[in-house]
Image (cartoon, rainbow, N blue to C red):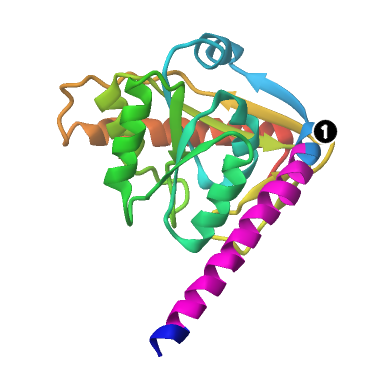
Amino acid sequence: MGHRRRTFRVRDFAYETFIGRLIRKVLVPLVRLWFSTCRVTILNERIYHEYFLSDIPIVVGTWHRASIYFLYFFGNFRPMIMISQSKDGEMLAQYASGFGVIPARGSSQKGGRDALEQMRGYILSGGKGCATVLDGPRGPAYVAKKGMIHLAKLTGAPLIPLIWSANRVITIRDSWDKTMLPLPWSKVYVAFGEPIDIPAETSSRALEYYRQLVQDQLNSMMEEVDRRCGYR
């Protein structure tokens, strides 16, 4: 029996290795080509140039529906992004690493504290920035959790909300987050929110104020980009 269990583990490892290679060698290049055809319009370009195209360390938050495209869009910045420890998270981590993203494995449900410590160390050692989906890993959709707010407090890096929408998209309607993918040659609007500075002395109770502020700003931005694109 012991030998049989070891055999299954070897087979599982080989299968996961095969899937990982397939994602990096086949899926990532195809997605890169696909997304490169999109025409991007940036809203609030000042934030983009001042924070994303500079050496200023940042903490970024978005909604789960936007994650697939943003892993491509921000890969060149070498961000560290929190990705859950689930099997789906493993595939997403393989996909993300193909674009230059550094995965920190954890979520609000499991491993989140260790992942936040990795992200804190990354920023304090000179990393450009860290990010995650604020309503992950399982929702509810468009309701922010406090992980990135806490990270911004620990590091002193500003928290910047961002979101995108497009005039032609694929929406996975039966998913809890309504995951979106821009169709080839679609027009994508990317909105950058105003940076939110969270003082180091902010109490745990006061973090709720910033959580609500980020959530409200992100939802307002989402409504704006969806309106511009005619997305419903």
Three-letter amino acid code at disc 1? Thr
User: Taken as a whole, is the magenta stretch helix, strand or loop?
Assistant: helix
Q: Quadrant of residue 208?
A: top left
Residue 42 to residue 214: above or below: above
Left or right of 11 on screen, residue 83: left
Depth order, front residue of 135/212: 135
Q: What's the residue at 71%, 22% (across, down)?
A: 41
Residue 167 to residue 94: above or below: above
| Residue 212 seen in this snapshot | no
Depth order, front residue of 56/39: 56
Residue 70 image position (x, y, % from top left): 60, 36
Residue 160 image position (x, y, % from top left): 45, 24
Determine if the magenta segment contains residue 21: yes
SS for tag 1? loop
Residue 106 to residue 165: above or below: below
Depth order, front residue of 171/137: 137
Q: What's the residue at 60%, 54% (across, down)?
A: 178
Residue 4 image position (x, y, % from top left): 47, 86
Q: What's the residue at 34%, 44% (across, down)?
A: 145
Left or right of 110 on screen, residue 64: right
| Residue 19 seen in this snapshot | yes
Residues drawn in magenta: 5-32
Q: What's the residue at 57%, 10% (across, down)?
A: 49
Q: Mark 1 Cα within 10 Å, few/some/many (few <14, many 20+)?
A: some
Give the farthest residue toward the front: 3
Give the farthest residue toward the bottom: 1
Determine if the magenta segment contains residue 170: no
> Which residue position is annotated with label 1?
37
Q: Quadrant of residue 18?
A: bottom right
Left or right of 52 on screen, residue 204: left
Residue 36 image position (x, y, % from top left): 78, 32
